[in-house]
Image (cartoon, rainbow, N blue to C red):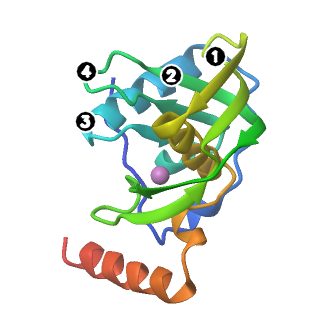
Amino acid sequence: MAILEILEYPDSRLRTKAEPVTDFGAELQQQIDNMFETMYEAPGIGLAATQVNFHQQLIVIDISDDKSSPLVLINPKITEKKGVEQREEGCLSFPGVYAKVERADAISVEALDRNGKAIKLEADDLLAVCIQHEIDHIEGRLFVDYLSPLKRDRIKKKLQKLQKSR
Ligand code: NI
């Protein structure tokens, strides 16, 4: 396995719209394993393929404290949304940045698992927020898009400064 480089805002590649996964072979399996390793190492609770410059509709999630609930969602679609919730979000592409975002409180999702088998799941609370955040990534959307232009600009300057100082 390998740790992958995570693209950081305002890298324009984060705006790429991912293509559906069609090949579930060894290369994809390796990509999934590498993404889990990268996410756990960061550490984070979700990672979209877009963030590691792999532009297929693939996300990995684990909201547990002990790496016990790995979830792979491929070509995911939200089929139902219920309620509204505001929660503070962070993102591995925005080190040190947190902001409140409003999203659906409960969702239904249809996706494929890592073997291409269809799955349906219901999620609420943190998992629902995480799935919505990651699906945004594969569509080229970022959580700062929900903030005011002023706030977004401030975050952009902060991150550009951080990137220059490395
Ligand atoms: Ni993110």
Q: Nearer the viewer, residue 49 or 118?
A: 118
Considering the image in quadrants, where does the C terminus appear? bottom left
Q: Which residue position is annotated with label 1?
A: 113
Q: What kind of residue is marked 1?
A: Asp
Q: Tag 4 or tag 1, which sits nearer the N-term?
A: 4
Q: Which mark is residue 71?
A: 2
Percent across and percent down for residue 163 are 29, 73
Percent across and percent down for residue 134 are 56, 44
Q: What kind of residue is marked 3?
A: Glu
Percent across and percent down for residue 7 are 43, 57
Residue at 37% across, 40% down:
4
Q: Tag 2 or tag 4, which sits nearer the N-term?
A: 4
Mark 1 nearby-residue class (10 Å; few <14, some 14–19, many ≥20): some
SS label for mark 1: loop
SS label for mark 4: loop
Residue at 50% across, 34% down:
127
Percent across and percent down for residue 102 are 57, 60
| Residue 9 in the image: above or below residue 47 | below
Find the residue positioned furthest to the front: 83
Alpha carbon separation for disc pair 2 and 3: 16 Å
Q: Which residue position is annotated with label 3?
A: 41
Alpha carbon separation for disc pair 4 and 3: 12 Å
Q: Which mark is residue 66?
A: 4
Q: Nearer the viewer, residue 11 or 73?
A: 73
Q: What kind of residue is marked 2?
A: Leu
Alpha carbon separation for disc pair 1 and 4: 21 Å
In this picture, residue 55 sits left or right of residue 42? right
